[in-house]
Each structure stands twice: as C-alpha cells, then as structure tokens.
Image (cartoon, grey):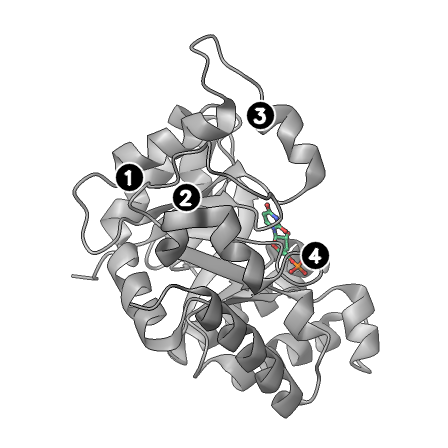
Amino acid sequence: MTEPFGARLRHAMDERGPLCVGIDPHASLLTEWGLTDDVAGLERFSRTVVEALSDRVAVFKPQSAFFERFGSRGVAVLEKTVQEARAAGALVLMDAKRGDIGSTMAAYAEAFLRKDSPLFSDALTVSPYLGYGSLSPAVALARESGAGLFVLALTSNPEGGEVQHAVRADGRNVGATMLAHLAAENTGEEPLGSFGAVVGATLGDLSTYDLDINGPLLAPGVGAQGATPADLPRVFGAAIRNVVPNVSRGVLRHGPDTGALRDSAERFADEIRSALPSA
Ligand SMILES: O=c1ccn([C@@H]2O[C@H](COP(=O)(O)O)[C@@H](O)[C@H]2O)c(=O)[nH]1
C-alpha cells in the first residue's frame, strides 16, 4: 500500500529541503530559452527542467494551464512530464485548481488522483469556492490513492482578499474557515497530514490565522511575485516547518542552461534553509 502523501512529502522535505519548483512554460520563457512557442518547445522546456532538477528538489509543480494552451498535444506533454518527474524520484503537485459541484468534482478527482490515470499526480490543487463539501469526492479518492490535495485558502494574488477575507455570519473569514476544514481533515495524521492549504508568501504577517493545520502549506509568490525566502518566518511564524515555498519564474528564467537552473534552485534552497529555525 502507498504511503500517504503527507508522510512522503515530510520525508522528501527532510531529505531535500522544502523547495517546490514550478514547471510553468510561459510563452515568454519559451522565447527567452530560444525555443519555439509550440508543442516541441513545450516538450523540450519541460524535459530540461525535470532533467536538471529531479534529483534535488522535493516537489515539482507543473502549471496545467501552460500545457492545456496547446490542446490535446499539450496535455500529452503534461502526462509525460508528470510520469518522467515521478519516475526520477520527485513528487509532483499538479496545479490545475479544479473545483465544481460534487458529481463533477468526482470526475476531476479521477483524472488526477486515480492511480491508473495518465495524469495521476502525488497531489492536486483544488478550489473550494463551490463550498468545501463539494471537494469530498477528491478528499475520498486522495485518501484511497495515497495522494494529497492543496486547497486554495489565502492565495498570493492581491485580488484574492475580496473572497478569502469575506467575513461569515459566525465572524470567521472564508480563508480561516478553509484552514479549519483542513485541520479537521488532518487530525491525528503523523508525521504530516495529506491535506494542505495554499497560502501566499506575499501576504505579510498572518499571525491572526491559525496555520497549524497539521498539513503542508504551499507558499507561492517567492521570486517573480516579490516575496523572498527571508520573508517566510514573518509570514508563517511557527508553521514554517510545514511550508513548501514555490518558485517558478524565479528559477526558470535561468534556463535553458541546466547548470544555471541548478545553481538558481540551489540558491533558493540555501536561502530557504537559512530562513528556517535550526532543528
Ligand atoms: O495563490 C496562488 C496559487 C497558485 N499560484 C501559482 O504558482 C505559480 C507561481 O509562479 P511564479 O512564477 O513563481 O510567480 C504559478 O503557477 C501560479 O499559477 C500562485 O502564484 N498563487
């Protein structure tokens, strides 16, 4: 039986450090890398990132949008990328941000979380904005497959507050409510629950939130969106041990040279390590 995602992630973070590198083949990056903005360029880009970094980063986060842009042939590249990254020993967090009514959510869950699916990933980002309960089929299948979910709680973009800071009738805001759902999902799990939250590294002091969800906190926003590894302790406080900082463009802009990609990832990893409290 597969070990649960949370346990696999904890081991990977302890061994390799918590850095998650995004695979975001923006059209502008393909051009900067001297590649064509087509399926061949997409394939070369993704393979280069996986080959350069799969022996050193804990997690890759392919951004599905940049593959879907090319239709079925782009999705075929995404399938290959996921399979190659997993085969090379990295965990794959698919950033597809799926969310729908429960009966449709069940089909999204099958696409990404059923073990024999071509797009099976170790974890998936999901949107709870049709109600947290609408995610139940994905929670159930993730548990069955030993996979994980990352639920959008407090996103890194400035527009997110309009929804996530809205205050409910019980006085708690929406983002905090999502964190509470995840804490309940992860109760009693050791060494780490499999149900994580997306919490932007760009958000400043989050001490009014209870980030102690016994699950991972994916922290996008480091690099191109302006947050730095040094910001992480101020943003996440005591929850920092469970933070998985994501960097996409901040690393990818150094390609296509594999040495330069590695150096950049190592620099971010070192800065993150320095920001963590000593064990
Ligand atoms: O709140 C969120 C949730 C997801 N993202 C995604 O993370 C990467 C960030 O890329 P950078 O190039 O490091 O800015 C990207 O795939 C986003 O879609 C996020 O930024 N914020």
Q: Is residue 109 left or right of residue 51?
A: left
Residue contact at pointers 2 and 1, CB within 8 angstroms: yes
Q: Residue at x 27, y 48 (%)?
A: 193
The CA distance from mark 3 to mark 4 is 21 Å
Q: Is mark 3 on a helix, strand or loop?
A: loop
**Residue at the disc numbered 1:** 140
Q: At which x and y percent is residue 189?
A: 19, 47
Please, what is the three-letter code of the amino acid marked with disc 3? His
- If the image is split into quadrants, where does the C terminus sit? bottom left
**Residue at the disc numbered 3:** 165
- In the image, is the residue at mark 2 within 8 Å of ligand 1 by its beta carbon? no
| Mark carried by residue 109 | 2
Q: Earlier in the sequence, mark 1 or mark 3?
A: 1
Q: In this view, does 130 lie above or below 267?
A: above
The CA distance from mark 2 to mark 1 is 9 Å
The CA distance from mark 4 to mark 1 is 36 Å
For the residue carrying disc 4, how many other residues have a C-alpha within 10 Å: few (<14), some (14-19), or many (20+)? few
Q: Which of marks 2 and 1 is nearer the N terminus?
A: 2
Picture quadrant where residue 3 is located: bottom left
The CA distance from mark 2 to mark 3 is 27 Å
Q: At which x and y percent is residue 161?
A: 63, 30
Q: In this view, does 149 lie to the left or right of 160?
A: left
**Residue at the disc numbered 4:** 226
Q: What element carries label 1?
A: helix
